[in-house]
Amino acid sequence: MGVSDDGKPIATAKLARQVMDYCRSLDLPVIEHSEDVSLAAGRGDARGRHFNTLGLRGMPAAAESVCVARDVQLTELTGARLHIAHLSAEGVT
Ligand SMILES: [Zn+2]
């Protein structure tokens, strides 16, 4: 079992921290959809140059990487377990 935000990413670091605190106390992993919607601007996924080669306008890779960085930092703060459900941007590690 775990808790997921897939389909509607957690918008703020404050809420993400609260979720991680609760999940840590319940020993449940957080399964996240890594997307900062304020950067995604309603676009599709972040497949970088391959996506753009096809003439499609994806969200910037930063919309994904910013969220991953935020939540990795929050796992260090809270001790929560984090599973990143899927990534599409190049260079996000
Ligand atoms: Zn997702």
Image: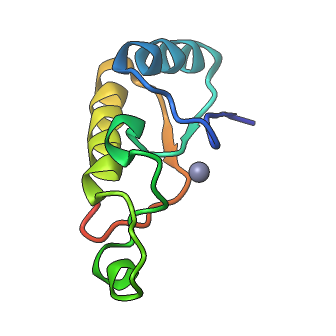
Name the one closer to the observer, 22 or 59.
Answer: 59
Residue at image coords 69%, 34%: 2
- Percent across and percent down for residue 79 are 40, 24
Residue at image coords 29%, 33%: 70
Q: Is residue 17 left or right of residue 65?
A: right
Q: Quadrant of the C terminus?
A: bottom left
Q: Quadrant of residue 41?
A: top left
Looking at the rendered structure, the number of numbered marks drawn on it comes to 0
Residue at image coords 59%, 34%: 29
Residue at image coords 24%, 68%: 91
**Colouring method of the image:** rainbow
Q: Quadrant of the N terminus?
A: top right
Q: Is residue 77 left or right of residue 45?
A: left
- Percent across and percent down for residue 20 are 49, 21
Q: Is residue 49 left or right of residue 37?
A: left
Residue 93 appears in the picture as rendered:
no
Residue 50 appears in the picture as rendered:
yes
Q: Is residue 77 left or right of residue 22?
A: left
Q: Is residue 38 above or below residue 17?
A: below
- Percent across and percent down for residue 66 are 27, 43
Name the one closer to the observer, 89 or 58.
Answer: 58
- Percent across and percent down for residue 4 are 64, 36
